[in-house]
Amino acid sequence: MKGMKLLAGFSMCLGLMACKGDVSPAKLSGNASLRLADGSPISQSATTEYNPYVVKMPDGFLMLVFGSDRSCGGCTAGTHNILVARSLAAYNDDARLPAFSTPTVFTVGGTPLNSATAVSFVATKSSALLRIYLANAGIIQYAELTPTATPYNVAALSSIAQATLARSTLLGIDATGGKLFAKHASASQPFYFEPMQNTRGMTRISASTDATAVLHVSADTTGQSDAFLALVNGAVVSVSHGAQGAELTQLAAVFKNAKVNVKSLSVLHAAAKAGELVFLSGSEAGDTKQDLFVLEGSNAGSLWETLSSRPASGSAAYAAWTQPQLTATRVYGQNGSFTCNVINNNNSGCVSGGATPNDRSFERAFTVSVSDNGIYVADQYNNRALYFPGVSLSATRVYCQSGNFNTRIFGGTPNSQTCRGQGTYGNVPSVFADNSGVYLNDIESSRILYFAGTNIDAASGLGGRVYGQAGNYATFASSTTDQGLFNPDSTAADATGVYVADTFNNRILHYPGTSTTADRVYGQPNYTTNTAGTSATSLNGPRGLAIAPDGLYVADTGNNRIVFFPGTSTTASRVYGQPDFTSNTAGTTAGSLNSPWGIRFFAGGIYVADYNNHRVLYFAPEATVATRVWGQGGSFTANTANNGGLSASSLNFPPGLDVDQTGLYIADSLNHRVLFFPR
């Protein structure tokens, strides 16, 4: 995800990924869960796990350090120790955590700490070594460990150079790993200092003396060096050198909804902003044991509220400040103009290039997928997908046209570089990108192509794959089997595998890992039927998918609804757009839909492209009535194409969208453009 944004400015909840052994498997297998190689959680349901620190080492691998009262080799039952685990693969700064090795107890002289109370510590790196600072008998000392060398043992703990402040209470560590956050009986406020420098210098921050944890938000994310989040009496507040801000209310809502009392807070600092995950531990309602959690849908920077620019709560300025931005500030496909909607704009004003596309044009921009480094757009009638780096309006990569920006090849026999299309127009309606590569829906060939990395050839020899054709790149037959597809309209992927909306088969398929044979089907009782239906277990022409930490959202287009399937269940438990699971009437209200297509889950809520109503709706977490609307001047009962005239706020049959911390991207198909609405 990109950029620093103000949490209060988008009034939504974030996702809380539980990592305990008694939660649903879907939560344990999410992108940001702390898990072992077999998918089981690192936390144990009968023990307490707390204060997680995840550190990215120079080789790209992660080190997890946490406290626990679990049994372990040499541990005294019921005592507290520090455990350490190394990731089994490098971390790509993409918010998709790799699995970890089995945690190993940290020992000093071969003996675990066996503390009668919870251990106080923080973790960072020192060159290629993992450094753990811990308050041992009330004095801050440290140990350095080689990540690949187990057992994790040191002969003795080392003293820090700053002896005067060694008896401070540990609160956290800064983004560089060189300064400790602490509090001391002689200081009125928490402060940070350099433990390895023999000076008495310390810098106070304006957090309450009740603070129990401090998280440093990287200056690369916020543009300022004194951006901190502090945990004060269980509430997360924003802090700088000069002021302590109010509680981050949207984050508080997450904790309240999850019924979690937060006890610690830390951050994984990464090169890419998307990878800066926030970790915490806390106890769930009715349970005295702590568990490890990962905050989904946001990074540390997006949580930071700029203290100096925030209007007073309750003021007219605050009300205006928290409203969503309904006017786009960037347009792709129309030479920068918000009042032009020609096919294949030839970049000389508002002039159509006809049947000749280019690196800046569309004929029906159908879906958009955001990556940390840019966006991907499915350019349907040009039978291709384009990649735009950063905020550039010019594409640098084209898919399904053998690398040529000026062709629109249709028909014939498909291969690993081209898509078949139909007659005189193409049909690539969907693109989905993740950290590993790009998925492209070639629906007239009843297949999905997967392009590894930045390749524009999906050949298996280049790490690519083809779904729906039993591994054959030259066939395009439709079928209804666990390997077949029939006009599949969209794709989504997570750590468990790949989901495909198999539209004409009225079903959703899940493919585990890199397999091209499905292991789960939604909407049908088996892999050989494709009957449309309207119930909690049936679908009618599904077109959009969105993966959430706790389940799967499906745009059930023919039934004018969104359905949510919890965990790995194939029975929906929640419906949007209809009063029940057996209705499918189209409508134009805040609680109804008319042919919804694209859908995205973000920070607890869902965004829906309500195609035939020429609008995009936002539904707050678990709410089935929309609270925001784009494309209709703020009205939930209007459904006019280009309402008020073609502009930076109008839409004309929007089928796709995507969202990140910077804002909302909408594929505005019949205006042949993509619009960006900032937060």
Image (spheres, grey):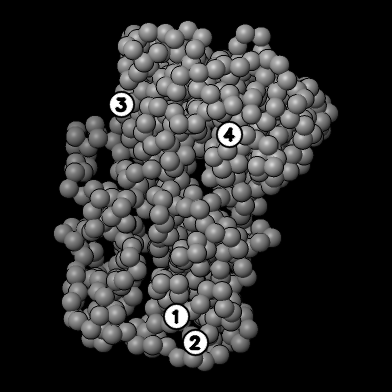
> Does dot 4 land on a helix, a strand or a loop?
loop
In front: mark 3 or mark 1?
1
What amino acid type should be assigned to the residue bearing mark 4? Ile
In front: mark 4 or mark 3?
4
Q: Which of the labelled discs sits on residue 144, or is there none?
A: 1
Give the alpha-carbon distance from disc 4 to disc 3, as whole Å.
30 Å
Provide the residue designation for mark 4. 456
Give the alpha-carbon distance from disc 3 to disc 1, as whole Å.
49 Å
> Does dot 1 land on a helix, a strand or a loop?
strand
Q: Which of the labelled discs sits on residue 329, or is there none?
A: 3
What amino acid type should be assigned to the residue bearing mark 3? Thr
Q: Quadrant of the C terminus?
A: top left
Give the alpha-carbon distance from disc 2 to disc 3, as whole Å.
56 Å
- Mark 2 or 4, nearer chain start: 2
For the residues bearing labels 3 and 1, Cβ distance under 8 angstroms: no
Left or right placement of residue 77 versus residue 217 in this view: right
Provide the residue designation for mark 2. 154
> Does dot 2 land on a helix, a strand or a loop?
strand
What amino acid type should be assigned to the residue bearing mark 2? Val
What amino acid type should be assigned to the residue bearing mark 1? Glu
Left or right placement of residue 467 versus residue 22 in this view: right
Give the alpha-carbon distance from disc 2 to disc 4, as whole Å.
49 Å
Q: Position of residue 519 (x, y in %)?
A: 76, 42
Give the alpha-carbon distance from disc 1 to disc 4, as whole Å.
44 Å
Give the alpha-carbon distance from disc 2 to disc 1, as whole Å.
8 Å
Count neighbours of disc 4 (C-alpha within 10 A) and say few if under 14, some if 14 to 19, many if 20 or more. many
Q: Position of residue 189 (x, y in %)?
A: 20, 70
In front: mark 2 or mark 4?
4
Q: Position of residue 664 (x, y in %)?
A: 40, 31
For the residues bearing labels 2 and 1, Cβ distance under 8 angstroms: yes
For the residues bearing labels 2 and 4, Cβ distance under 8 angstroms: no
